[in-house]
Amino acid sequence: MLKRFLSYYKPHKKIFALDMAASFTVSLIGILYPMITRLMLNDLIPNKNYQMIILLASALLGLYLARMGLHYFIQYKGHMMGVRMQAQMRSDMFNHLQTLPYQYYDNNETGKIMSRMTNDLMDISELAHHGPENVIISSVSIILAFIYLSTINVWLTLIIFACAPLLVVFASFLRVKMKEAFKESRMAIAEINASLEGSISGIRVTKAFTNSREEKRKFEDGNGRFVEARRNAYRYMARFHSFTTFVTDVFNVVVLIAGGFFLYGGKITFGDYSTFIVSVNVFLSPVMTLIGFMEQFQNGVTGFERFVEIMNEKPEFDNPNAQPIKNVEGTIEIKNVTYGYAEDSDVLKNVSLKISKGKTVALVGPSGGGKTTICHLIPNFYRLEQGNIYIDGIDIHNITLESLRRNIGIVQQDVYLFNASIKENILYGNPNATDEEIVLAAKRANIHDYIMTLDDGYDTQIGERGVRLSGGQKQRLSIARVFLKNPPILILDEATSALDNTTEILIQQSLDELCKGRTTIVVAHRLSTIKNADEIAVISNGEIVEQGNHNALIEKGGMYAALYKRQFRENN
């Protein structure tokens, strides 16, 4: 994990080296004050060498001005280095998320993923900048302090440094506890973000069902867990800081008492004793910096571990022998496919189905029978473990995912539109399309006339998830998007089931236009919309129980006939 973290420094080697050099110089300047103090107390002041006093004071002031400039460089350039590393990690995570399979998103909430991309990476950025800087400045300062204090009185210095292991031992003891506590608090923040994302996205449903109290209760539960997790983290942190503060106070007492005995015994001069008392802070200050760094280190390490967890998730992958598919005609064959989302339950059981190019096949049957699963398996959204699916006689596992999905258009019941303009949403079907092609796709989807009634036309912003559009308008935009994509294979997964009858008729006209010349799979709840399908497959409990055209299945008098007659009675 350390190697992966250090790899993000590579593009910033120059600025990192300058930052570390500046930090090292700051440490050197810091040791000059006690050295000048000692010289003044022991020599310049007793000998009344005022000219040298003024000269050294002026030189010290100049060095402090230089240190001010170095601090500015460290704070500005160093932080920007951390921000750029954070941005690179965020890009890497986003790009990796794009490659993860459907199953990952089935098992992970959006809010938790967002929390890892924002809060966690912010702490990593701080660690990336302040970590090496604090370690270098503090380590150099401690070493220089030891060397310098030893020149004053080596025995008194050894007594002071003998107390240092207490800090190291205690810091190591609490390090594990702090790490676990901060990791719990990270998870609690992620849960809050997930709850918040779900509540805000579903605010209209909440208001419609007057369930704001329930949403508040769920949020407060998560908020309470966060407070408790943070309480544990701060409890360990409080123990850490209170003890370390006590140890540093003991340092001062040790210096006062031991130095007093040394002064009384004539082993140290009064000037050196005074300098030692002043100079001991040169040692204590970097020690306290390292102590404070422990909290930042824990936050950063915890955040990076959570970042690595996502980066270690296995992405979708092409088989080694996979090739792009070209000139797709659209013949589909599903052969002996068995599939289940969980290991102990199969949604599909030995399903076989062949669809000739340009034909329309409808999948009907009770909910949960496996119709949508078939629609997800054809574009290889979920990887088959048993059975095969062929496109134009080629196993989909031997087709690159990008080329396979480029040749399949999907229109679903739950239309997802981006918070952008109408034009940008249609362009999602083909980002390289011209304005003329966009307008043509909209006309074929029967949405162009409506768009032209809007003040901003195709540049109209439609809001989050297309909230400013009706259900039928959103569906037509999704159809225009597929028109622009112009795929040879089309999957309509209950594309009209959420619409009223009048809107459904209008949308159906657009879908009929879309299906022309394409191999089409239709999942339909309303059987009246698929009467003219070339073939109908009835799926129940993961198996195809009936197959044929509308008239043949009605004559057979089986499950399809029963479903059709029941809908016919309900419609009447």
Image (tube, helix red, strand yellow):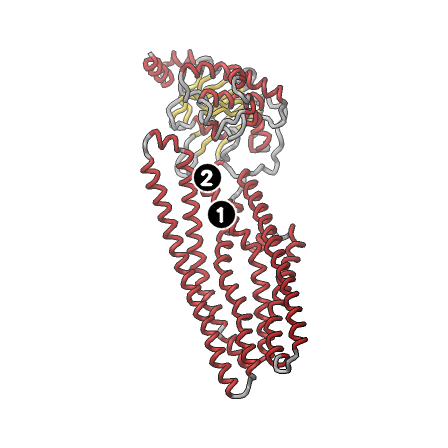
User: Which of the 4 image quarters holds residue 144?
Assistant: bottom right
* Residue at left offset 37%, top offset 24%: 366
How many C-alpha atoms fall within 10 Å of the one at disc 2: few (<14), some, or many (≥20)?
A: some
Image: 162 above or below 240: below
Kind of element beneath mark 2: helix
Q: Name which quarter of the figure residue 457 lies in.
A: top right
User: Circle 2 is placed at which residue position?
Assistant: 110
Residue at the spot 51% in from the left edge and 25% down from the top edge: 410
> Circles 2 and 1: CB distance less than 8 Å?
no
Q: Position of residue 332 (x, y in %)?
A: 53, 24
Name which of mark 2 and mark 1 comes first in the sequence: 2
Say if 474 sits above or below 91 in the image. Answer: above
Which quadrant holds the C terminus?
A: top left
Viewer can see residue 336: no
Q: Position of residue 228 (x, y in %)?
A: 36, 52
Q: Percent position (x, y) of residue 57?
A: 64, 70
Q: Is residue 490 left or right of residue 564?
A: right
| Quadrant assignment for the N terminus | bottom right
Query: Which residue is the extreme one toward the bottom?
Result: 265
Asked if residue 181 is positioned above or below residue 48 in the image, the reply reads above
**Residue at numbered disc 1:** 119
Residue 177: percent from the left, percent from the top? 42, 60
What residue is shown at x 66% (from left), y 69% (from top)?
58
